[in-house]
Amino acid sequence: MENMIFNIYYINFDKVYEIKMMLSNIVSLGKEKQTESSDGNDFEMRSRLGARFLNFFGAELEGKAKSTGSDSQKVLETFEIKTTKSIILNEVIEKSRIISTLESIKEGELIQINNVNLSLENEAELRIVKMFTSGSFKGLTVPGANGLDFTNLFNSMFKDYAYKMKGDLDGIEEELLVKIPVTFESEFESSYSVDDLFIGKVTIVGLYKGKIKIDSLRNSFEFYKDLGEFANFQNNVNHPDDEIQDSQYSKDTQTHSFRSSKFNDKEYHYIDLLAIVQNVNIPS
């Protein structure tokens, strides 16, 4: 397989590095080139042979021999080789199987899927989470909360939150699903943002995990949100006159913007994501 040239949008470097080490635990840090040149060291050995039988011919034979020795001279040239994320990822990509259809993939198989159109599954919810984790509410205090640190509370609640993204391939009805953990720093390489993943098509590298429903990707924030909605529902049932709602909007309508397809029964091909890259096409 020819080396693929690519630009990294996202990489789970810990996973990629572990797989690369299992494939080969040798990482090239430098090379040394040696060349040898030989100089001839000529010497002449002259010998005079006087042989009786040659004297018979009245001649004296002078022999001349030439021998060549060799002196070795080494020339060392040092080359610096950068071990970057792209080089390590490329070794993993070379061992992956290129997939053009979502059928007949074995669970645990290392695969590469090109020309994927990604879309964000939990966009409205995610924008709120990013607002909280950006520090916008740092120092927020609530009367009667006894000095509760809401920043730490939010960070704990969002610790396992993730971008949930659906992917589709042209001409294929079934869709795939990937997730990227949300961190408090930057999740993406080279100052990219999540929105850059939805411009054009990308290549996905990962481990196939089979079919799942979106609600299998649960996190703490969704758990507490659903728990709060259930508590409000119970409160409204027990005390129907305590809250007056606008008759133009139902409860389902009010929360619709935060709902996702996790409320349907559709199954997706789940990929344990190693990297998302953009292929770079260079003219021959």
Image: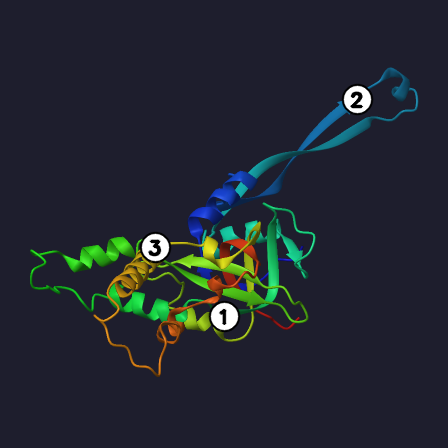
Q: Total of numbered circles in the picture?
A: 3
Marked residue nearer the N-terminal end (1 or 2) = 2
Marked residue nearer the N-terminal end (1 or 3) = 1
How dense is the environment of label 2, judged by Cα within 10 Å: few (below 14), some, or many (20 and up)?
few
Does 257 appear above or below 48?
Answer: below
Q: CA distance from mark 1 to mark 3?
A: 23 Å
Q: Which residue is mark 1?
A: 119
Q: Secondary structure at mark 1?
A: strand
Q: Which residue is mark 3?
A: 223
Marked residue nearer the N-terminal end (2 or 3) = 2
> What residue do we see at 89% from left, 24% from top?
58
Q: Secondary structure at mark 3?
A: helix
Image coordinates of residue 63 in percent, x first then y, are: 78, 29
User: Of discs 2 and 3, which sits in the foreground?
Assistant: 3
Does 2 appear above or below 43?
Answer: below
| Residue type pointed to by label 2 | Leu
How dense is the environment of label 1, judged by Cα within 10 Å: few (below 14), some, or many (20 and up)?
some
108 or 221: nearer the viewer: 221
**Proximity of marks 1 and 3: CB atoms separated by less than 8 Å:** no
94 or 149: nearer the viewer: 149
Residue 128, image quadrant: bottom left
Q: Secondary structure at mark 2?
A: strand
Image coordinates of residue 29 in percent, x first then y, are: 46, 46
Does 243 appear above or below 38?
Answer: below
Image coordinates of residue 206 in percent, x first then y, are: 54, 53
Q: Quadrant of the C terminus?
A: bottom right
Asked if one can make out residue 7 in the rendered structure from this viewpoint, the answer is: no
Q: CA distance from mark 2 to mark 3?
A: 107 Å
Q: Is residue 256 rendered to the left or right of residue 43?
A: left
Q: Which residue is mark 2?
A: 49
> What residue do we see at 65% from left, 47% from top?
106
